[in-house]
Amino acid sequence: MEERTFEKLVLPHLKAGYNLARWILRNEDDAEDVMQEATLRAFRFLDGFSGTNPRAWLLSIVRNAAHTFISQNRGRTTGTAIDEELHAAKASAERPPETPEAALQNKDRQRALNDVVSAMPVEFREVLVLRELEGLSYKEIAGIAAIPMGTVMSRLSRARRLLRAAMGGGT
């Protein structure tokens, strides 16, 4: 019974968890390690889940595991480049074909965007990823990050401002 519940509640959200871990850690291998640990924690503590939002619950576990990983590996540098082609495949499949010049410009813009987000302090990066890439509400982000909703809004505003400034959109 527990295995079936785990499959129903947790497995559909593993991709979102990996995405969050990858952006927090800026390293695909480390994100995989953190996801493995987070998945084990979720399985171990499944009977402790009493809420109605398994996605937010799993993302909270992933976030905590990622921050634990960071604190345990402070001396080690993270930051392996993210494979933009792999993560942009879905988006490009949904768009009409583009000219080679446009494709090159889009690839360069995507790489620059990834670089800007990766360079942000982790507290800004995680709220931006949770809101803009995972589509979570401010309330859900506040619960996951264990911070007040006002702090979520403030960090998100600052992250967007940093993004606009770095991408040439002003302050």
Image (cartoon, rainbow, N blue to C red):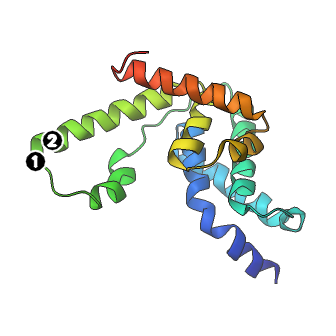
Q: Residue 20, percent across and down?
A: 59, 46
Q: Residue at the location (74% across, 45% down)?
A: 144
Q: Residue 128, percent across and down?
A: 56, 36
* Quadrant (top left, top right, bottom left, bottom right) of the N terminus: bottom right
Question: How crowded is the residue under tag 1: few (<14 C-alpha within 10 Å), some, or many (20+)?
Answer: few
Amino acid tagged 2: Ala
Q: Farthest residue toward the right?
A: 48
Q: Reply above or below: 122 against 85.
A: above
Q: Which residue is mark 1?
A: 99
* Quadrant (top left, top right, bottom left, bottom right) of the C terminus: top left
Q: CA distance from mark 1 to mark 2?
A: 5 Å
Quadrant of the rendered image containing residue 13: bottom right
Quadrant of the rendered image containing residue 45: bottom right
Q: Reply above or below: 23 against 157.
A: below
Residue 63 horizontal side relative to residue 22, left or right: right
Q: Regarding mark 1 in the picture, which secondary structure is present there?
A: loop
Q: Residue at the location (34% across, 30% down)?
A: 112
Question: How crowded is the residue under tag 2: few (<14 C-alpha within 10 Å), some, or many (20+)?
Answer: few
Q: Residue 124, percent across and down?
A: 60, 28
Number of numbered labels in the structure image: 2
Q: Reply above or below: 5 against 147.
A: below
Q: Residue at the location (74% across, 35% down)?
A: 149
Mark 1 touching mark 2, by CB under 8 A?
A: yes
- Residue 102: numbered disc: 2
Residue 76 visible in the snapshot: no
Q: Reply above or below: 165 against 88.
A: above
Residue 33 visible in the snapshot: yes
